[in-house]
Image: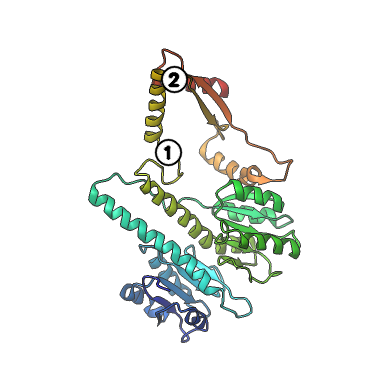
Amino acid sequence: MSQQGPLLIVADDGRPSFATALDEAQMFPLIDTNFANAARAVAQVQPAAVLADMRGADDERFAALAKLIAAHKPYLPLIAIQPEGIPGENAIPFTPHASNFDRLPARLRAALRVRTLHTTLLRRLTDARAEGSVLPAIDPARDATVLLLGRGGAYPALSVSLGERMGVVGAFSIEAAASHLNNRDIDGIVLGEGFTARVMDAFLTVMSEDARFRHLPIILTSQELAPTYELPNLEIICGEPDHIAANALPLIRQRAFEAQLGCTLRAFEAKGLLDPQTGLLTLTAFDRDLAGAVKRTQSDGGGLSVARFAFDPAFADTDLRTAHVLRDAFCVMRQTSNGPRATRSDPVVTVATLLPKDSLQSLLARLHAEAHRAAS
């Protein structure tokens, strides 16, 4: 497999055993170094990915290496093999099952796909600058969203730990989780306690058979099941809620970054008509299309109505500090589904119809006036 550069293996005790799995998968060339020389090796060989053997690794040296790699462009995957603690925000943990590293090539290929997307985007950005084009806004630090599936005593603590690091959507049942996966943009799943091994096996089997979710990060918080499914980003992380959330973060952020890269590339294909963060029409493009619709309706006849969707304002009369406290407290409650009895957050819908003497400005002014009265 070509990965646009060598793979750098960092270990202090000679070539680690996981290199054999990469050799067998024909992922080469492989270059060995130790932690003392890792930063220099990254600069010299320009690797496509870095795999660090964390057994006995020096924490300070690894932290310095992770910081260097985090600032690298294009995206440089860093995979921490058998981490004992929390490797860092950009270090993807990989823990083998029964000392078997067969899943490592699939995990690495998934990360290299993100690198390829980022390389393509950076090339498009360079071409756009050369042509004098207006570049779309890019925010690589956009928050990720994780689906927390579970129930039981550990659920509240785990939801808080995840909510401190990313957006959280909660589900108490497999059916609710399926609904969220079909209707929301989810960047990862944390499968907590409260389900039998048979139920979890059925869920993971379905996920592995659906191409939409095959590369979605899935975090198991118990060792009841072996990670033998065709899911390259399936990882077992056990321990306290903070430990689980911190170790799950790099995989989930990588997925969110991949989704954003794809959205930004589609915005390029649309020549700036789509917002790279939302995938929706930009305000300029929407105003242009709406103005065209108004003009055609007035010249050709017919009717035109405009609808405005808005949700209830949050913490409208609350100071910033109190709002942050309330946000943390209500984050999980607002986003947790409890099946058919779950509460819904319905939008306020206002409608304005184009009148014979209307202009675009008067139509929008009346629409916003109607929305203000509806909110009041």
- Which residue does the image show at 62% across and 76% down from the upper left? 97
Q: Is residue 376 visible?
A: no
Q: Residue at x 51, y 28 (%)?
A: 308
Residue under pointer 2: 363
Percent x, y for residue 122? 33, 57
Q: Amino acid at mark 1?
A: Leu
Q: In the rendered image, which quarter is residue 120 located in?
A: bottom left
Q: CA distance from mark 1 to mark 2?
A: 20 Å
On-image quarter of the C terminus: top right
The answer to whether 53 is drawn above or below residue 294 in the figure is below
Query: Which is nearer the eye, 332 or 326?
Result: 332
Q: Residues within 10 Å of mark 2 (few under 14, many from 20)?
A: some
Q: Position of residue 54 (x, y in %)?
A: 51, 76
For label 1, the crowd category at 10 Å Cα-Cα, with few meaning under 14, some 14 to 19 and many 20 or more, is some
Q: Of label 1 and label 2, which has the lower sequence position? A: 1
Query: Which quarter of the image is occupied by the N terminus?
Result: bottom left
Whether residue 27 can be seen here: yes
Of residues 135 and 319, the one drawn nearer to the viewer in this rendering: 135
In the picture of the structure, the residue carrying the numbered disc 1 is 281
Look at the numbered disc 2 and give the secondary structure of its residue: helix
Q: Is residue 29 left or right of residue 149?
A: left
Kindly identify the residue that appears in the image at 70 percent across and 64 percent down: 201
Q: How many marks?
A: 2
- CB under 8 Å between discs 1 and 2: no
Amino acid type shown at disc 2: Leu
Instruction: Point out the residue furthest to the bottom here.
Output: 14
